[in-house]
Amino acid sequence: MELELPSHKGEKSTGRIRKKNEEKIINAAKEEFAEKGYHGATMDSVARRAGLPRPNVHYYFDNKLQLYAEILSIIVDLWDDALNDLDPAEEPALALREYIQRKMAFSRRYPLDSRIFAKEVLSGGPRLETYFQRGYRAWFERKTRVFHEWAAQGKMDPVDPAHLMFLIWSATQHYADFETQVNAALGVSKLNDEEFDAATETVVSVILKGIGVS
Amino acid sequence: MELELPSHKGEKSTGRIRKKNEEKIINAAKEEFAEKGYHGATMDSVARRAGLPRPNVHYYFDNKLQLYAEILSIIVDLWDDALNDLDPAEEPALALREYIQRKMAFSRRYPLDSRIFAKEVLSGGPRLETYFQRGYRAWFERKTRVFHEWAAQGKMDPVDPAHLMFLIWSATQHYADFETQVNAALGVSKLNDEEFDAATETVVSVILKGIGVS
DNA sequence: GTCTATAGGCCGATAGAC
DNA sequence: GTCTATCGGCCTATAGAC
């Protein structure tokens, strides 16, 4: 199933009602897709959660797949915007600390987005095919090049850049994606700010020391 | 939706045909659930993948939920059996290296199991409620106590045990759960043994050094 | 134990009145 | 732009012949 992820900028009309309703639908759909997955979510549950009649949802989004693709597109854009690259000119310890903190803050603030993306990848990413094919390898290479440079300059240990990036991503996203398990393990219903900061600090300190930059 | 995870030992009869067919169905269902999730998988697709007529699946498993619960139960048992605890008496560097290697080997060998479990947790674990409630906190505390001991004995840095465990779990399971993204980033269709060993070595070395045991 | 045929329910999507 | 009513398809589950 190939599918063009539509840019959600410069859409049709931008009436105030339209914009507000679209937003309500998107937010409702994010919760439904995050919890029940693409197949488990129903247009009816989305509509009810948005406080709108079912056909109204179809009025704004032609069909379920388009609504889902729109959300995936928003998530991908959001990640690209929010997570500016690591700056090779900065000190590795500081740059990495900030990067990990940004990723953790992202997990805390947008857990639904993280989960939707995770579920899609877990399914083999059939609706992200063009995303993963069109230049994803090059994009990833650019993201990790800074590790190469730092290692070459002796600023950090010669750790495999790709796997280091996977380590950072997995460790940080874990707190959004596996929140249920984390909460159960710690015996809480939700991590408070202090607990989340402790998690962040642990991830930061282990990884920084682990690659020899602290 | 509360649900008792049935022990899959000591079931009804154990005729050879029954056992063989049940196995075929379980394996087919694992692939379907891992790829499409609980709602996306259909009893028909399971049956076709198993090479059996649809009602035959219902003959062995009363309904879809029971089949799914049975698989979850198998996965949980498998994890508990395969991942023996860290031995406090062993040297931390060796014990941890072996533990991480076991987890990575598990991701390599049973990616479907890992993905099914991940999807369930991502959904909030409604079918793992009893699992996460009945003593999960205590079980987790036991798993991480060894880190406390090592730290108290000055054998490793005083890293938060719980978050260290999350770091290890997330880093290792990433290679099963996010295989699609990993492959896309590295430009391969599947990691070969050498590449997987490189991943393992990176995870091991960063974490060991990161907590001061190497 | 195996399989055809089908009942019954849910869901996506749309027609068409307002 | 909003909403009621409904069609058609797919899916779970089972009845019942073999």
Image (cartoon, coloured by chain):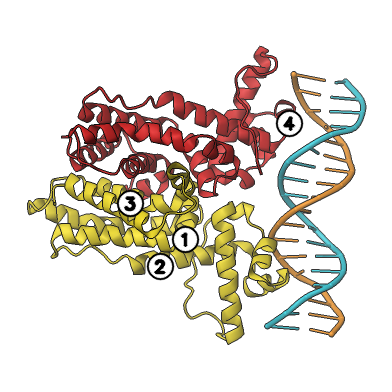
Chain colours: A red, B yellow, C cyan, D orange
Q: Is residue B56 left or right of residue D4?
A: left
Vertical arrangement, residue A7 with respect to residue B118, above or below = above
Q: Is residue A184 left or right of residue B73?
A: left
**Callout 4: helix, strand or loop?**
loop
Residue shown at the point (13%, 61%) measured from the top left: B91
Do residues under tags 3 and 4 come within 8 Å of each other at their CB atoms? Answer: no
Vertical arrangement, residue B15 with respect to residue B147, above or below = below
**Callout 1: helix, strand or loop?**
helix
Structural distance between the alpha carbons of marks 2 and 4: 44 Å
The chain letter under disc 4 is A
Quadrant into which the C terminus of chain A falls: top left
Residue shown at the point (67%, 38%) measured from the top left: A65
Q: Earlier in the sequence, mark 3 or mark 1?
A: 1
**Of circles 3 and 4, which is in front?**
3
Structural distance between the alpha carbons of marks 2 and 3: 23 Å
Vertical arrangement, residue A16 with respect to residue B125, above or below = above
**Of circles 2 and 3, which is in front?**
3
Pinpoint residue A200: horizontal percent, then vertical percent: 28, 36
Structural distance between the alpha carbons of marks 4 and 1: 35 Å
Amino acid type assigned to the residue bearing label 1 in the image:
Asp
Amino acid type assigned to the residue bearing label 2 in the image:
Leu
**Mark 4 Cα shell of 10 Å, populated few (<14), some (14-19), many (≥20):** few
From this viewpoint, which residue is outermost toward the top?
A15
**Residue to which mark 2 is pinned:** B78
The disc placed on residue B199 is: 3
Residue shown at the point (27%, 53%) measured from the top left: B201
The chain letter under disc 3 is B
Q: Is residue B35 left or right of residue A100?
A: right
**Residue to which mark 4 is pinned:** A62
Question: For residue A110, which quarter of the picture?
Answer: top left
Amino acid type assigned to the residue bearing label 3 in the image:
Ala
